[in-house]
Image (tube, coloured by chain):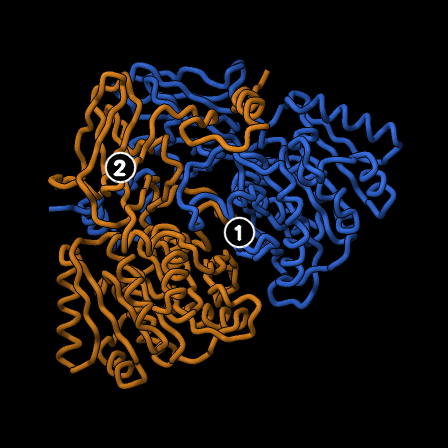
Chain colours: A blue, B orange
Amino acid sequence: MKRSLCTSLWLLALSLTIFVTDLTAQQNLWQKRSVVSPEIGADRTVTLRLYAPAATDVKLHGDFMEGSKSGSMTMTRSEDGVWEYRSEPLESELYCYWFQVDGIDHVVDPSNSYVMRDVGSQMNYFIIPGERGDLYSAQDVEHGTVARVWGEVSDGRERRMTIYTPSDYEGSKRRYPVLYLLHGMGGDEEAWIATGRVAEIMDNLIASGKAEPMIVVMTNGCTKHVSAPGYSHEGMWTPYMSGSMDGSFEAMFPSIVEWVDSNYRTIRKSKSRAIAGLSMGGFHSMQISKEYPEMFNYVGLFSAAIFRGKQGVATYEDLESKLERQFSGDLELYWIAIGSEDFLYDENVKYRELLDSKGYKYEYRESGDGHVWRNWRIYIAEFVQKLFK
Amino acid sequence: MKRSLCTSLWLLALSLTIFVTDLTAQQNLWQKRSVVSPEIGADRTVTLRLYAPAATDVKLHGDFMEGSKSGSMTMTRSEDGVWEYRSEPLESELYCYWFQVDGIDHVVDPSNSYVMRDVGSQMNYFIIPGERGDLYSAQDVEHGTVARVWGEVSDGRERRMTIYTPSDYEGSKRRYPVLYLLHGMGGDEEAWIATGRVAEIMDNLIASGKAEPMIVVMTNGCTKHVSAPGYSHEGMWTPYMSGSMDGSFEAMFPSIVEWVDSNYRTIRKSKSRAIAGLSMGGFHSMQISKEYPEMFNYVGLFSAAIFRGKQGVATYEDLESKLERQFSGDLELYWIAIGSEDFLYDENVKYRELLDSKGYKYEYRESGDGHVWRNWRIYIAEFVQKLFK
């Protein structure tokens, strides 16, 4: 006989609990959790635990470990079979991690319900409270709406987008400015909202008056696909390092703007439109904003892959004359940000030298770290505070 | 120096791939995947693999294994350290699984990017194509919008809902009927859309003309919380078996309907409203529809926890007289469904005996299996085909 997953556990758990309103996390029968992980201390340390009695080597991969160049270290086994790592006090931030158990890599912490996908991998995360961590966490403020929508674009296909509308959008007749926010290679329309914490950041900055209420449109910049994996008829492929740097995304972009303008209460003017993106999305933002200079007055290039377009594509030619046209227009802000350890650092230097040589005005923001989400969350939070004011 | 997670991997992967448009899943450098899992055969078998060279015991927990009462079995180790399980040909369905490695339970398959959360646990899933699997998969049809929205209800708080609007909602001025769809204990407003596959099911049934276009409102029936964990200021608690069977959810329900009617193009009539739910949500649907008989003409009780309300709550008293009022009204459909192995089977028999004794008309659907999502996906797909016709 075929038995259904967890039927027995359900029976047990539900029978025991259906009259019990609250079970603490520690008592959770469903998961039979024997350890608490992560445990965030009042001193801003984190303790991570994995019950692995038979393991001989449990490594932790994380982005919060001092003294670890590789980003991994071996955890300590206690006599009861629990492997543990306790950090130093950490600065306020969203941190990611996973375990490696006796050679099995990318083991997600079974005690931590919070996971995010980056390209094809799942990893856990936790947030250390404080200035930045609080910005990335839902607070007691009005929340905007996050919608996954499908819009037909110029290639005749429906494409999926994630659209954030601010809390006062519903129930008002007001029109709003729009930020188009573009992901990097291997990303999709889920990247900025999940890993980039855009809804939390926007809710918090708008509530505190630091950012104007705006619509944020998170597109899918891999033109080969119409959506993130699993959401379209293209099926449940394994996410991989894909993208489009062949002119196809730039070509369809005006039809995306047109669709958004037709379906949302937008202000249909360049002074109320911004475009920004990370890595490949920074490249796209640079290209799209110079191809359609009448469309966007605000441009953000985050860790942009400036000079990586496919050779021989007309869109990517005549860069200097197109920039001249763009910078002679109504540009309000051209914002370039990159980490000092980013592998794209040198080509951003080269690009800024080009802009400098022409006397084009831009703002430059350099952070530490490399080509990582930690930087992109910082950049988006700073960038949106400069828009539409 | 603090190094960021994956910086080195990013550098490697991006340097190698930024000029390469397509990498196959097998070549994915990001994840350094050494095995393919799941592999779904043309013969509708599934092969699952885990690279665990040092493990001495790898078990598979899944809901698709013949001959396994417990839902788990030991996998087979090959000489290269890969543990493997190959199924018999499976009927078309969405299946869930996880690994147990040397006593570490709930190890998510690192090669499978597709996970879903049920209460506090993450698990992998895969879909065997065919009739039912295709219904649960995105197809080449028009897709509706899925939005996470916040609406203020009668307790003065904003509460989070997941709302599906059909593909023709945008760009039309038409009004639509509404199905209110309620989760069980430990669930929240994410349950039906993620594990219940409601967007895929609705898109596919509407596209094939089997269901009327409708709005589906997936509420949060745990009144103690305003949202699923992580989405509100209540923080990132570990999901647990929580719910509200104390009259509080029933009391606020009219204000939810009012909010939806005020913010969406709904048909504000009982003949265009349905309410259904699973387990605790079935209990809620029974209670709410009898408390407000003028509100809903369609009611669905899926594996309902019929007689589990808190003692002494006025809402739950005078059942028979309230049912008499409800069944003397404009009820179009009262649909009761349960699995033959469900631990709530007996009280559903008892409830039907009560309805029978009064001569009240209802439809009854009995399936195999127990208190599991497999049944609830079947029920929702059958139920929505009966609505608003």
Q: Is any atom of residue B310 visible in this view?
A: no
Pick whichever, A114 or A35, lies toward us: A114
Q: Could you confirm whether marks 1 and 2 are on the same chain?
A: yes
Q: Which residue is mark 2?
A: A32
The Cα atoms of the two marked residues, 1 and 2, are separated by: 38 Å
Q: Estimate how packed mark 2 is, as few (under 14), some (14 to 19) or many (20 or more) residues with alpha carbons within 10 Å.
A: some
Pick whichever, A273 or B150, lies toward us: A273
Residue at image position (79%, 42%) is: A333
Residue at image position (52%, 63%) is: B151
Q: Secondary structure at mark 2?
A: loop
Could you tell me if the residues under marks 1 and 2 are in contact, i.e. CB atoms within 8 Å?
A: no
Q: Which mark is residue A160?
A: 1
Q: Secondary structure at mark 1?
A: strand
Name the residue at the front extreme.
A312
Residue B305 in the image, given as x and y percentages of width and height: 23, 61
Image quadrant containing the C terminus of chain B = bottom left
Residue A52 in the image, given as x and y percentages of width and height: 29, 23
Pick whichever, B305 or B217, lies toward us: B217
User: Which of the two labelled residues, at mark 1 and mark 2, occupies the earlier sequence position?
Assistant: 2
Q: Is residue B329 left or right of residue B227?
A: left
Q: Which chain is disc 2 placed on?
A: A
Q: Is any atom of residue A173 visible in this view?
A: yes
Residue B213 in the image, given as x and y percentages of width and height: 43, 69
Quadrant of the rendered image containing residue A121: top left
Q: Amino acid at mark 1?
A: Arg
Q: Estimate how packed mark 1 is, as few (under 14), some (14 to 19) or many (20 or more) residues with alpha carbons within 10 Å.
A: many
